[in-house]
Image (cartoon, rainbow, N blue to C red):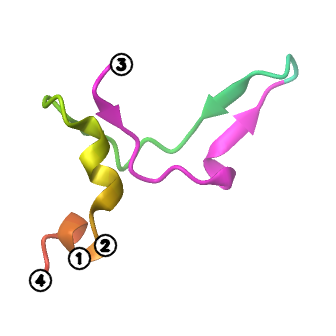
Amino acid sequence: QCNVVHGGLKPSNILINDAGDACVSDWSMVDFQPSRNREAHRYYSPEAWKGVS
């Protein structure tokens, strides 16, 4: 919805507060995706993310 890709979402980056709400942490790999094809990042290889072939 906000065109933001976390880039490192894993169980250890999801924190649950006392009210039971999930909070996402570690935004160091965040990327802003202006395009409409926000789901394409799911199919990138690790090499493509790093810019290595």
- First-in-chain label (3 vs 1): 3
Residue appearing at x 13%, y 31% in the figure: 35
Q: Residues under labels 2 and 1: Cα distance? A: 4 Å
Query: Residue 17 placed where, x, y %?
Result: 80, 26
Asked if labels 1 and 4 touch by Cβ distance under 8 angstroms, the answer is yes
**Secondary structure beneath label 3:** loop
Magenta residue span: 1-17
In the image, taking residue 51 as reference, residue 25 lies left or right, namely: right
**Secondary structure beneath label 4:** loop
Mark linked to residue 47: 1
Q: Is residue 51 above or below residue 27?
A: below
**Residue highlighted by disc 3:** 1
**Secondary structure beneath label 2:** helix
Q: Quadrant of residue 37?
A: top left
Q: Residues under labels 4 and 1: Cα distance? A: 6 Å
Q: Residues under labels 3 and 2: Cα distance? A: 24 Å
What type is the residue that disc 2 sits on?
Pro
What type is the residue that disc 1 sits on?
Glu
**Residue highlighted by disc 2:** 46
Residue appearing at x 25%, y 48% in the figure: 40
Asked if labels 1 and 2 touch by Cβ distance under 8 angstroms, the answer is yes
**Residue highlighted by disc 4:** 53
